[in-house]
Image (tube, grey):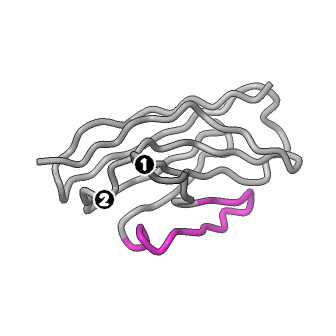
Amino acid sequence: QVQLVESGGGLVQPGGSLRLSCAASGGIFGIDAMGWYRQAPGEERELVATISSTATTYYANAVKGRFTISRDNAKVTAFLQMNSLKAEDTAVYYCWLQRFGMNYWGKGTLVTISS
C-alpha cells in the first residue's frame, strides 16, 4: 500500500518562500511520476507541478518561474520549492504519485500566504 506524507507547509508572508516535501513508502517501485496539486477554499483541486521518472517537469502557468519541483529517486521523495509566494497560492497542497497507472494522494499540507 503506497503512502504519501507531506511536510513543510505553514504561514509565510507574501514574497516569502516555502519548501514542501513528500515522502513515499510501501510498494514504491515502478513509479511513473510524482507531483503536487493544490486546493484553495471553495475551489477545485488543481495541478501545480509534476515530475516524471526521467525528471521531465511540468508546471501550471500560475507557478512557472516561481516554483521548482524535484525528486530524490533513492529516497522516493518529491520536493516543491516555492518562491515569491502570493496570497493566491494559499491552499492545501497535496502530494500525488502515479504507479502502474494508479493514482495515490497524500493527506495534504496547508500553505497560507498572509501578512
Q: CA distance from mark 1 to mark 2?
A: 13 Å
Q: Is residue 69 above or below residue 60?
A: above
Q: Say left or right for 51 vs 103.
A: left
* Label of residue 110 in the image: none
The residue at which mark 2 appears reads as 88
Where does residue 40 sit, x and y in percent of width and height? 41, 49
Q: Quadrant where the N terminus lies?
A: top right
Element carrying mark 2: helix
Q: Quadrant of residue 94?
A: top right
| Prevalent SS, magenta region | loop
* Label of residue 42 in the image: 1
Q: Residue type at mark 1? A: Gly
The magenta region covers 50-65
**Mark nearer the N terminus (1 vs 2):** 1
Farthest-out residue, front? 42
Total tally of numbered discs in the picture: 2
Farthest-out residue, left? 115
Q: Is residue 40 above or below residue 28?
A: below
How packed mark 1 is, by other alpha carbons closer than 10 Å (few <14, some 14-19, many 20 or more), is few
Q: Is residue 87 magenta?
A: no
